[in-house]
Image (spheres, rainbow, N blue to C red):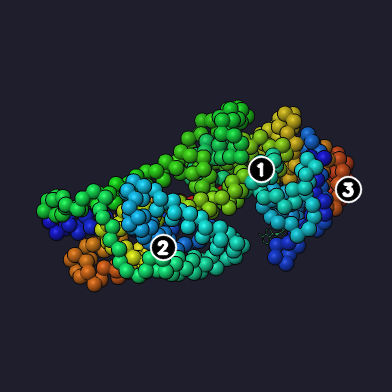
């Protein structure tokens, strides 16, 4: 039982990170049908810039917003400089552009910060909390709390603000959205800013638990992609569930079978979903057509 | 002239859908455009709305050249389209759909316009919290029309508002068009239901295979032999 709890805690912690990355995939997909393979690099940039700012001696409450804003700025720059100029190209071309951008971002990070691993101090102590014989890291609570705040904020944004509703509307029916005067370029830019935000938050929250380095985005990006697919591409709240499910399955596999198979779980899930459940567990909410 | 289109040409890839189309609509006028399936009516409206990029021609609105203006800039100027095919935000509530119609307007004016629009379409008031996709076909048409009114249009581009509606609902839609006209809204009405459209229009155009082949007052076209044969089934 203690083992099970232990695996569950670590599964939920990583899963929350995957969920945030998956959310970024879903948001950009909804705005453009592009699968942004640079998503993982947003996680890396969030984590790395937070580590860097900490080294400069800034306090945590300043580090987090700065790292998030910096990553959002990179997201917007990616959209403005690489996606927007190719707006009329096919979706496949745009996806390839995001792959190129991810290589570029990773390379730049390597040049700036080197290839070594960095650790970041936990936000509040590292003394594990004992729950039913399992050890829960305080940072895990930060990860979970941060994810919940992010999701609630997103829900509020989509459900209560005019801009958020415009973004939802553009996903449901881009043609009608243009006819009511919603600037689709603005929505696209906003989607990159938001997924930069969620990526950065994930990267910062997880950095104290798993070490961060310039290549950390590759695997996290793929896991987030898996979360998004599992939840049904284009369904933000499906991506959250997908991320948690993936994190827990990975932790259980690593715990009960072997950690050697941990990463294989994600790819097995991607394959199974694509074969048997192409619209994911929670499907995409679509516009009714008559 | 409020809206002037001069020699518009448009291509879908290599297929030319509009050939040198010139139409204009004056302030307060109700102008109709009739034509068969595939004549290019929707294409023309989408070109006016800035959804489709023209291959040639000039669009002027209140004297300003808006040929290269974006679709959202045109909505801001008051060019608002009611598209065919019930284009709504299906999973969102009726009220959200309506409020999005006022997206280009100052936030604080939305509520007041909503009241005004719901007076014109009372049955939407009872269903305002429901998902738009759950409305019946006729109600969806009303929703798309009222969403356009939320933008306070200077010119309303109506794409086949009677299509697929039961006769009673068609009367309802045309009653509303009449009422809007009385309120001074300029209307460009596209219809396959040629008789209804010509009967209420001051002026009208006939579009065939992407070309304007006839124009005149509504009554002139109703009396025209060719129109009678081709569009009125007389
Ligand atoms: N997206 C498209 N790609 C290629 N051709 C198109 C496209 N949309 C329309 N067309 C073609 O352009 C022509 C004009 O179409 P359009 O939809 O403007 O006609 P319409 O007069 O609105 O017809 P309807 O009465 O059926 O609505 C048609 O021949 C149609 O097949
Ligand atoms: Mg049409």
Q: Residues within 10 Å of mark 1 (few under 14, many from 20)?
A: many
Q: Secondary structure at mark 1?
A: helix
Say which of B200 and B203 sits in front. B203
Q: Which chain does the residue under circle 1 lie in?
A: B
* B120 relative to B92, above or below: above
Q: Nearer the viewer, mark 1 or mark 3?
A: 1
Q: Secondary structure at mark 2?
A: helix
Total tally of numbered discs in the picture? 3
Q: Which mark is residue B44?
A: none
Q: Determine contact: label 1, label 3, CB under 8 Å.
A: no
Residue under label 3: B225
Q: Residue furthest bottom?
A: A260
Q: Which mark is residue A41?
A: 2
- Quadrant assignment, res A282: bottom left
Q: Is any part of residue B20 visible from this angle?
A: yes
Residue under label 1: B75
Q: Nearer the viewer, mark 2 or mark 3?
A: 2
Q: Which chain does the residue under circle 2 lie in?
A: A
* x then y, percent, for residue A211: 28, 63
Instruction: Residue at 17%, 57% (x, y): give it.
Output: A6
Q: Secondary structure at mark 3?
A: helix
* x then y, percent, for residue B68: 72, 52
Instruction: Residue at 49%, 44% (x, y): give it.
Output: A164
């Amino acid at each position: 039982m203690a083992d099970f709890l232990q695996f569950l805690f670590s599964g939920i912690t990583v899963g929350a990170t995957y969920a945030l990355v998956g959310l970024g995939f879903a948001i950009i997909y909804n705005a453009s049908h592009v699968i942004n393979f640079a998503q993982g690099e947003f996680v890396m940039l969030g984590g790395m810039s937070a580590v860097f700012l900490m080294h400069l001696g800034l306090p945590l409450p300043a580090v987090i917003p700065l790292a998030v804003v910096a990553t959002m700025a990179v997201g917007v720059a990616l959209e403005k400089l690489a996606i927007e100029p190719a707006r009329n190209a096919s979706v496949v071309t745009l996806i390839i552009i995001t792959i190129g951008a991810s290589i570029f971002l990773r390379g730049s990070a390597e040049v700036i910060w080197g290839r070594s691993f960095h650790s970041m101090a936990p936000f509040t102590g590292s003394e594990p909390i004992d729950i039913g014989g399992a050890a829960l890291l305080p940072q895990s609570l930060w990860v979970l709390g941060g994810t919940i705040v992010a999701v609630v904020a997103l829900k509020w944004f989509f459900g209560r603000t005019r801009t958020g509703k415009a973004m939802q509307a553009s996903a449901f029916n881009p043609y009608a959205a243009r006819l009511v005067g919603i600037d689709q370029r603005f929505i696209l830019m906003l989607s990159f800013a938001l997924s930069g935000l969620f990526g950065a938050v994930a990267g910062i929250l997880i950095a104290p638990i798993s070490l961060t380095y310039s290549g950390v985005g590759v695997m996290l990006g793929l896991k987030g992609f898996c979360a998004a697919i599992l939840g049904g591409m284009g369904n933000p709240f499906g991506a959250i569930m997908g991320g948690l499910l993936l994190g827990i399955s990975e932790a259980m596999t690593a715990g009960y079978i072997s950690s050697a198979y941990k990463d294989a779980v994600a790819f097995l899930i991607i394959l199974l979903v694509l074969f048997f459940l192409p619209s994911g567990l929670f499907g995409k909410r679509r516009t009714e057509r008559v | 002239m409020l809206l002037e289109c001069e020699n518009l040409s448009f291509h879908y890839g290599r297929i030319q859908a509009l050939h040198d189309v010139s139409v204009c609509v004056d302030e307060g006028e109700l102008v109709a455009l009739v034509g068969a399936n595939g004549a290019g009516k929707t294409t023309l409206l989408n070109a006016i709305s800035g959804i489709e990029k023209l291959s040639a021609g000039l669009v002027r609105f209140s004297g300003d050249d808006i040929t290269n203006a974006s679709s959202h800039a045109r909505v801001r100027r008051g060019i608002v389209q009611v598209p065919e095919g019930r284009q709504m935000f299906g999973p969102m509530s009726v009220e959200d759909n309506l409020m999005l119609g006022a997206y280009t307007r100052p936030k604080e004016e939305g509520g007041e316009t909503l009241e005004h629009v719901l007076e014109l379409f009372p049955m939407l008031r009872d269903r305002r919290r429901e998902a738009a996709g759950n409305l019946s076909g006729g109600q969806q048409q009303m929703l798309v029309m009222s969403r356009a009114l939320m933008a306070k249009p200077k010119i309303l581009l109506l794409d086949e508002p009677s299509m697929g509606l039961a006769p009673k609902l068609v009367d309802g839609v045309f009653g509303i068009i009449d009422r809007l006209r009385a309120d001074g809204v300029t209307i460009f009405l596209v219809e396959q239901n040629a008789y209804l459209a010509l009967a209420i229009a001051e002026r009208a155009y006939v579009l065939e295979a992407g070309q304007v082949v006839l124009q005149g007052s509504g009554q002139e076209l109703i009396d025209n032999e060719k129109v009678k044969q081709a569009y009125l089934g007389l």
